[in-house]
Image: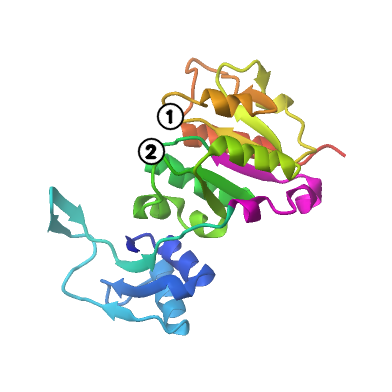
C-alpha cells in the first residue's frame, strides 16, 4: 500500500534510504527550491518519475472532503514502511555503541503527532531502534512520517503484537528496561548511563500499562522545576533521550 508524503525532508530520506519504494514524485512549483530541489534532483538520479503540475499553485487552497487544505510545493507516493523483525532490532545490542546505546518502546501511544515527533527526536539523538505496539496505537500513517521529518526512515523500528514479550527479548539481548512515569521516585538524572537502555514511553492518558511496568528494571521521572507538573509525551521522551545519551564523566 502506498501513502502520500508531503514533507520534502521525509521524501528525501525515503529516496536516500529505500528509493525502490518511492513510486513517483509530484511537484507543483515550476522551479523547486531548497529541499524540494534536492528531492527533484535525487529522484532524477534514482530514475524515479517526477511529474510537474503547474495547475495548482503552492500556498493556495483546494477543495477536499470535509473542507479545504493548503496546497504544498509537492508530494510523493511511497510504499508503507514495514519495519524490521524484532529479533533484528535487538541483534548484538549489548556490543553496540561501546556497550551503551538507547532503544525506545512506545506503549500504546495514540497521537500520530507524538509518534512522529518521537521518531524525529530519536533520529537526532542516534537512537538504535524503536518498538511500536500494533494494537490501540497510532498507525504509522503519512502524518506520522511527515511529522518525523525523515526520522522514520533513519531509525529502525519493529511492530510488536505483545510488548511484554518484546521487553523480555530485549533483556535477553543484554538491554536494561527503563520505564517513564511521573509517579516514579527516581529522577532521570540519577539513572546510570554506562549501560544499554530500552526506554518505555507510556500512552498520553494512562501512561505505562501494568504489564509493561512490571517488566521494567527501573522507573524514573522528569522532576518538574516550575508550576506545571507534566509534559507532553513526545517532549518528555525528548528530555529523557537527551539525558540518557549524554556523555558519561571520564
Q: Which mark is residue 111?
A: 2
Question: Where is residue 201 shown, x and y percent of the image?
Answer: 54, 33
Element on which disc 2 rests: loop
| Residue in view at x 43 percent, y 71 percent | 21
Q: How are the colours assigned in the image?
A: rainbow
Q: Which mark is residue 204?
A: 1
Q: Are marks 2 and 1 in contact (CB under 8 Å)?
A: yes
CA gap, disc 2 and disc 1: 8 Å
The magenta span reads 86-105
| Residue 113 is covered by the magenta coloring | no
Question: Where is residue 151 shown, x and y percent of the image?
Answer: 51, 54
* Foreground of the two, 34 or 85: 85
Asked if residue 246 can be seen in this view, the reply is no
Question: Where is residue 225 shown, x and y percent of the image?
Answer: 57, 18
Q: Quadrant of the N terminus?
A: bottom left
Neighbours of disc 1 within 10 Å: few (<14), some (14-19), many (20+):
some
Q: Quadrant of the C terminus?
A: top right
Amino acid at each position: 500500500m502506498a501513502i502520500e508524503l508531503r514533507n520534502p525532508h521525509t521524501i528525501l530520506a525515503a529516496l536516500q534510504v529505500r528509493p525502490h519504494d518511492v513510486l513517483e514524485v509530484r511537484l507543483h512549483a515550476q522551479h523547486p527550491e531548497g529541499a524540494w530541489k534536492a528531492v527533484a534532483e535525487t529522484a532524477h538520479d534514482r530514475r524515479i518519475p517526477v511529474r510537474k503540475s503547474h495547475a495548482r499553485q503552492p500556498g493556495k487552497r483546494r477543495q477536499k472532503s470535509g473542507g479545504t487544505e493548503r496546497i504544498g510545493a509537492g508530494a510523493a507516493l511511497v510504499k508503507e514502511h514495514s519495519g524490521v523483525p524484532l529479533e533484528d532490532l535487538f541483534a548484538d545490542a549489548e556490543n553496540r555503541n561501546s556497550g551503551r546505546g538507547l532503544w525506545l518502546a512506545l506503549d500504546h501511544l495514540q497521537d500520530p503527532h507524538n509518534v512522529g515527533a518521537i521518531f524525529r527526536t530519536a533520529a537526532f539523538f542516534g537512537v538504535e531502534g524503536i518498538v511500536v505496539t500494533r494494537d490501540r496505537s497510532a498507525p504509522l500513517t503519512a502524518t506520522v512520517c511527515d511529522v518525523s521529518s525523515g526520522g522514520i526512515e533513519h531509525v529502525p523500528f519493529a511492530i510488536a503484537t505483545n510488548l511484554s514479550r518484546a521487553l523480555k527479548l530485549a533483556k535477553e539481548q543484554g538491554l536494561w528496561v527503563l520505564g517513564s512515569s511521573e509517579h516514579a521516585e527516581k529522577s532521570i538524572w540519577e539513572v546510570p548511563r554506562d549501560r544499554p537502555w530500552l526506554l518505555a514511553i507510556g500512552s498520553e492518558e494512562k501512561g505505562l500499562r501494568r504489564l509493561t511496568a512490571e517488566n521494567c528494571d527501573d522507573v524514573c521521572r522528569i522532576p518538574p522545576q516550575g508550576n506545571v507538573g507534566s509534559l507532553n509525551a513526545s517532549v518528555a521522551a525528548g528530555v529523557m533521550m537527551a539525558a540518557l545519551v549524554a556523555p558519561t564523566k571520564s
